[in-house]
Image (tube, rainbow, N blue to C red):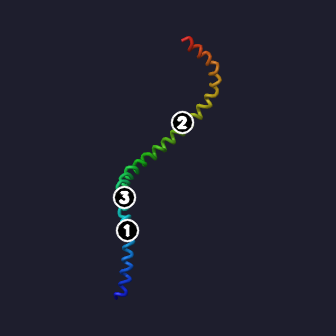
Amino acid sequence: ASQVLTPVSLVLQRLSQVLFPASQVLTPASLVLQRLSQVLIPASQVLIPASQILIPLNRSLILFKQLLIQFYQVLHPLNQPLHPLNQPLLPLNRFLILLN
């Protein structure tokens, strides 16, 4: 039995020589990950509801932008005939400013 157990004990000894240094690295790393999860889980509890508010707000802003574009598209052609009328009024406007 000792002839079987001796190679097994040698394998276990070698394994412990590899696993013990690895545990020295992995234990602090797991502590860091544990701390991170303690911060990130509460943060996600705040951020997920915030995103639920921001998504509809973003949609509203997109709709508002589209309305502004449509409003400009209506006003811009209306402004074109008024623009030439404005040109003769500029000297008169300057004259009135000088009189003041």
Crowd rating for badge 2 (residues with CA inside 10 Å; few <14, some 14–19, many 20+): few
Q: Is residue 91 above or below residue 76?
A: above
Q: Earlier in the sequence, mark 2 or mark 1?
A: 1
What amino acid is labelled 2 in the image? Leu
Comparing labels 3 and 2, the label whose residue is closer to the camera: 3
Question: What residue appears at the point 34 percent right and 88 percent down from the top-left corner?
Answer: 1
Q: Which mark is residue 21?
A: 1
Residue 51 is situated, as x and y percent measured from the top left of the image, at 43, 48
Q: For mark 3, what is the residue? A: 32
The answer to which of 12 and 79 lies nearer the viewer is 12
Using a 10 Å C-alpha cutoff, classify the residue at mark 3 as few (fewer than 14 neighbours), some (14 to 19) or many (20 or more).
few
In the foreground, 95 or 34 = 34
Q: Which mark is residue 68?
A: 2
Residue in view at x 62 percent, y 16 percent: 91
State the quadrant of the C terminus: top right
| Tags 2 and 1 touching, CB below 8 Å | no
Q: Closer to us: mark 3 or mark 1?
A: 1
Q: Decide which of tag 3 and tag 2 comes sooner along the chain.
A: 3
* Pointers 3 and 1 in contact (C-beta within 8 Å): no
- The residue tagged with tag 3: helix, strand or loop? helix
- Whether residue 95 sits left or right of residue 55 in the image: it is right
Q: How far apart are labels 3 and 1 at the CA level?
A: 18 Å
Determine the residue positioned at 54% across, 40% down: 66
Give the image location of residue 84, x and y in percent.
65, 23
